[in-house]
Image (cartoon, helix red, strand yellow):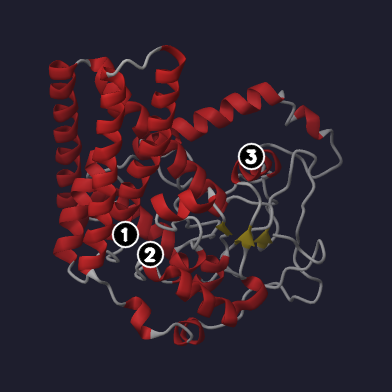
């Protein structure tokens, strides 16, 4: 993902009607049987992987070889779990089936099994899609501003503000990867800044929700409590250590992959964020980036959630298995506004975490500044800004 010039950005000016007309209608059709087939495949893979490590544990394999087996299990089971979570995400958008009832039944089961309050998160996630890349209204990954960090506009020594050692930066990054999603759900960490303190996804009266959402939030809470009971009973029956090894660590990988995928979708020096006068839905939808995430593993296990995310922001109802073809049609319309990165994703994670520090307060189209106060992209001089 490169730019011809540092200040080359021209905001998207196509209408949503023009963009939608470029996508063939058949790509919006949901195939319930196909969706269930993919879910069945994932569940069979999950069971096979679990039986395989169980057989290895009961065999004569021991020492370092057994540990390597466990590492392989955690890696692949974590990817499989994440793929199942992605299918739950499809349910939340109504892309799993044309039946809302089927979507919600599968969604509440799959997301509760992976500690996500389905109906509650569905509300905030839809609002994220409706206001994506808006500095005022987006739900998550809203950049910190210069004034929020107390950084003056005059010439300063930026090292006084961003002088963390690489080791400390790495530690903070690991904490983000493992705990950020649950911190967002429980404490609104990295969420909408205008929400009051103690906003969370478990309180039916939280500002996130309308009265019509209350019953869904309660059902989500009960489902999470039910999952807590299941895990408690499993620990009593099989032992806490076994539950941690077979389920807990793969779930931590789910948290890691989910945060990494979403962070890299929405946090990059090349991605714009808009203030109200310049924001519209299609500009916000284009303000994300498709990534070649883990090669074939990302495509097979993660259902293309990272490879084709731009089209998902334009049309979240398109089933994931149609996203590649839909992206090809999208690119014919928006052209250079389409962002794709082939940068290795762990390198991209480190780069974005270090380069994306804050945005300016006085611009309508904002790009991240790095730890030296520098931007790597900006608006072209020919663009008239409101």
Q: For the residues carrying marks 3 and 2, which lies nearer the camera in this image?
A: 2
Comparing 326 with 196, the one in front is 326
Q: Residues within 10 Å of mark 3 (few under 14, many from 20)?
A: many
- Decide: marks 1, 2 in contact (CB < 8 A)? yes
- From where the camera sits, is residue 202 visible? no
Instruction: Give the residue number, with chain letter if any, for mark 1.
Output: 90
User: Secondary structure under badge 3?
Assistant: helix
In the image, residue 136 sits, relative to residue 45, either above or below, namely below
Q: Quadrant of the N terminus?
A: bottom right
Report the residue at 57% width, 27% height from top: 172
Q: Quadrant of the C terminus?
A: bottom right
Q: Which mark is residue 193?
A: none
Q: In this figure, which residue is indicated by the disc labeled 2?
A: 320
The outermost residue toward the front is 60
Label 3 – label 1 distance at C-alpha: 28 Å
Q: Residue 6 location in percent, x, y?
A: 81, 61
Q: Where residue 292 sits: x, y (%)? A: 57, 55
């Amino acid at each position: 993902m490169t730019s011809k010039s540092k200040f080359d950005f021209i905001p998207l000016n196509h209408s949503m009607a023009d963009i939608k007309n470029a996508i063939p209608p058949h790509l919006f059709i949901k195939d319930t049987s196909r969706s269930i087939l993919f879910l069945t495949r994932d569940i069979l893979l999950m069971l096979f992987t679990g039986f395989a490590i169980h057989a290895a544990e009961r065999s004569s394999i021991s020492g370092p070889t057994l540990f390597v087996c466990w590492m392989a299990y955690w890696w692949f089971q974590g990817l499989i779990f994440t793929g199942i979570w992605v299918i739950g995400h499809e349910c939340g958008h109504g892309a799993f089936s044309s039946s809302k009832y089927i979507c919600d039944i599968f969604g509440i089961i799959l997301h509760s099994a992976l500690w996500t309050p389905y109906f509650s998160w569905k509300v905030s996630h839809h609002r994220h899609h409706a206001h994506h890349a808006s500095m005022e209204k987006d739900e998550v990954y809203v950049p910190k501003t210069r004034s929020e960090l107390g950084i003056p506009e005059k010439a300063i020594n930026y090292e006084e503000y961003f002088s963390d050692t690489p080791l400390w930066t790495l530690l903070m990054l690991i904490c983000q990867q493992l705990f950020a999603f649950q911190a967002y759900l429980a404490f609104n960490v990295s969420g909408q800044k205008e929400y009051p303190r103690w906003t969370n996804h478990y309180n039916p009266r939280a500002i996130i929700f309308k009265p019509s959402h209350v019953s869904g939030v309660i059902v989500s809470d009960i489902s999470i409590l039910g999952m807590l009971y299941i895990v408690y009973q499993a620990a009593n029956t099989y032992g806490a250590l076994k539950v941690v090894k077979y389920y807990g660590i793969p779930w931590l990988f789910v948290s890691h992959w989910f945060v990494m995928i979403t962070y890299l979708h929405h946090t990059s020096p090349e991605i714009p964020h808009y203030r109200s006068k310049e924001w519209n839905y299609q500009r916000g939808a284009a303000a994300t980036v498709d990534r070649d995430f883990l090669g074939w593993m990302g495509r097979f296990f993660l259902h293309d959630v990272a490879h084709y995310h731009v089209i998902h922001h334009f049309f979240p109802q398109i089933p994931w298995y149609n996203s590649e073809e839909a992206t090809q049609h999208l690119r014919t319309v928006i052209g250079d506004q389409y962002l794709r990165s082939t940068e290795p994703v762990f390198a991209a994670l480190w780069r974005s975490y270090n380069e994306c520090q804050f945005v300016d307060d006085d611009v309508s189209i904002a790009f991240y500044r790095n730890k030296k106060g520098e931007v790597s992209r900006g608006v072209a001089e020919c663009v008239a800004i409101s």
